[in-house]
Image: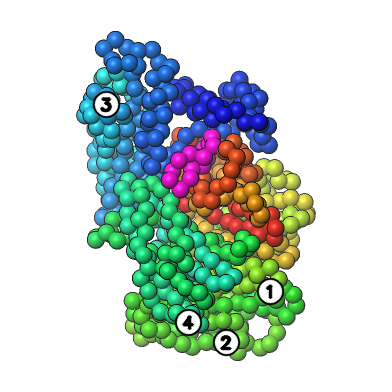
Amino acid sequence: MRIPSFNMGVQKLVFGTPAAVPPWRSPSLRKYVIAQDRPVARDDSERLSGSTFRRTVLVAAALTLSLFSGRVAAIAGCDGSPVPISIFASASAVAETPGSGSGQFVFVVDPNTGGTTLTLQITGSATNGSDYSAIPTSIVIPGGQAETLLLLSPLPDFVIEGSERVTVTITASSNSCVVVGSPNSATIAIADGDAVPLDASATTIVVPIVAQTASFSTEVYVRNANASPMTVNVNFYEATNSSVPGLRSCSSLIVPAHTTQLLTLGTQCVLGLGSHFGMLVLEDAAVPKTHKFTVFSRTQTPAGVGFSVEGFPLAQFGTTVASADGLKRTSAEPKYQSNCFVAALNSAIDYRIDLMTEDGVTIGTVTDSLLPHQIKRYLDVFALAAAPAVDYANVRAQVTGTTIVPVPFVAFCTMQESITFSADFRIAKPVSVVPTPIVVPVVARTGSFNTEVYIYNPSAGLLALNVDLYEAETSSSPGVHSCDPFDVPSHSTRLLTLGVQCLVDANSHFGSLLLHEVSGDTNSFAVFSRTQTPAGVGFSVEGKPLTHFKATPAGVDGLKRSSSGPHYQSNCFVAAPGGAMSYRIDLANGSGVPVGSPIFGSLASHQMVRHLDVFAAAIAPAGDYTNVTATITETSPGGVPFIGFCTMQESITFGADFRIAK
């Protein structure tokens, strides 16, 4: 039985302990937790408490104040006990690019406390006054003010230097009634020029596929990482073959600072009965646009079977050739149907869809055009392209704009099977935007799941790859495994099967793949993977360039746990691809309020850890959760890049879901 005062006791120990060693690493405290709460499956040294979400800054400060003042003796001249002052970061990263705005270090204290002057220590790989406007080593905190801001304004230097970090630490307070609290330091990364990952944050974001039908509905999670609330304009491009095709403006969405709001398509766009599907374009309503945000969506059946899609910045969609891999059609159960969509943005477009086998042989073509803001769906693209009536297992849909003056377009494909109605999503992308080496964040070879990896070589020469498997702890053979080399002929797509390429048996093997050229060259290639059960239920993951992964905090939205069927379990993974590191995982609801007690962990170089049932690992209170964010933060010095992601599985069809931390 849970003890009602247990959670508050844990928070008091965490927030009120100024020791350098996190309280959860105390053996005596671990014994207390296990004895007072319930046994847990994971290592209890991997837990802590707190949240980095800006939304909870005042709540955390108030909790810190009440707990701190209850423990620290009063100082003569103070009204009661001294109160702590803490520092938080308004965002995990800012861009060096001109016009991208500034980051903010936020100092929080009880507004009823007198003012103070803080002594600051400025550290990190970025140079004060050179990489960013000089930050002083002291700051005056006015009395009667709850928050004081210190700006971090990057200075473009036109030098390729990678992501750099700025850490501000409070070392002393001039007022003995205002003491240094926790956290006493905060870090913001400065991304090098335009090197911010395209899907990290943008002011206008495309959600490529959304639906509100009798079989599927879409939930969209919109995260505002800014220090102020934002209004998001919502536009729905409804596709041909849908009930009401065309462009419509939906109700705007207000997202408070540092929160994640849930947008339900049918409600936000006031859709009636019928079959509605297409794509969303979300944009900051401010003029000029100043708020960057991130988007994640989930389209699923009432039973929980479906697929997840990250929102893509509008700037990603250009005029170059874009392709979606791994399409198939089968005559035996489960039967597969592949559908493709093409959308025009602000201009009319002519285009062609070519279906090609893995050897680059064209088996069918669709030629068409679109008006501005129109989207077309090609239901059963194999039939519409007049492809021969045979089974296909590895087909590429290549979309080429043929308008005389090239204009941007959006293209993607979905694939559905006939037994569980499990659906799959593939964004069409230009391979030129994907540098090497490439990471496939999650792969598996177990009794229930197997991963297929599709690798497309757009070059005129042979692509020779080395393949390394980073197998996770609690897997059958954890560690780094060099798999057989893998060659992809010119202008071809080859299928890599994990169990064959890496010679792993059918026990429990899961982790990440790293693909890099044998020659050490950096030719671009594209990677798409599918992890699924024999019945075809599973999830798809695009390969990410290794440079995508940074040392800055990264979050995964939309995790949930439910007590009624289908039951959901969320698991989170952290991997260190190039150096030892320590980290923490904080769970918080959509309003930024902490859920349970976050998790501490550490990794050796090339190690991966899985936190099975992350809600249990965080000792979250019993109950259902529907909109939870897991934030992974590196706690070790040095800024070592890490890979973070979470999966979510339901208990009826074993449908799984994947969300990369970004």
Q: CA distance from mark 4 to mark 1?
A: 23 Å
* Disc 4 target residue: 240
In the rendered view, does 430 fall on the left or right side of 122?
Answer: right
* Crowd rating for badge 4 (residues with CA inside 10 Å; few <14, some 14–19, many 20+): some
Please report the residue visible at 29 percent of the width from the left and 61 percent of the height from the top: 285
Helix, strand or loop under label 1? loop
In the rendered view, does 525 fall on the left or right side of 91?
Answer: right
* Crowd rating for badge 2 (residues with CA inside 10 Å; few <14, some 14–19, many 20+): some
Q: CA distance from mark 3 to mark 2?
A: 71 Å
* Disc 1 target residue: 418
Counting residues from the start of the chain, the first of labels 2 and 4 encountered is 4
Q: Position of residue 494 (x, y in %)?
A: 64, 70
Foreground: disc 2 or disc 4? 4
Q: Which mark is residue 385?
A: 2
* Disc 3 target residue: 112
Please report the residue visible at 38 percent of the width from the left and 31 percent of the height from the top: 61
Please report the residue visible at 42 percent of the width from the left and 59 percent of the height from the top: 198
Q: CA distance from mark 1 to mark 3?
A: 64 Å
Q: Are marks 3 and 2 in contact (CB under 8 Å)?
A: no
Instruction: Look at the image and say whether residue 585 sits in the magenta stretch.
Output: yes
* Kind of residue at badge 1: Ser
Q: Nearer the viewer, residue 433 or 532?
A: 532
Q: Is residue 37 visible?
A: yes
Helix, strand or loop under label 3? loop
Counting residues from the start of the chain, the first of labels 4 and 3 encountered is 3
Q: Please report the bounds of the magenta region as a residue range.
A: 581-599
Counting residues from the start of the chain, the first of labels 1 and 2 encountered is 2
Residue 407 against residue 33 in the figure, above or below: below
Quarter of the view holding residue 305: bottom right
In the rendered view, does 475 fall on the left or right side of 517?
Answer: right
Counting residues from the start of the chain, the first of labels 3 and 2 encountered is 3
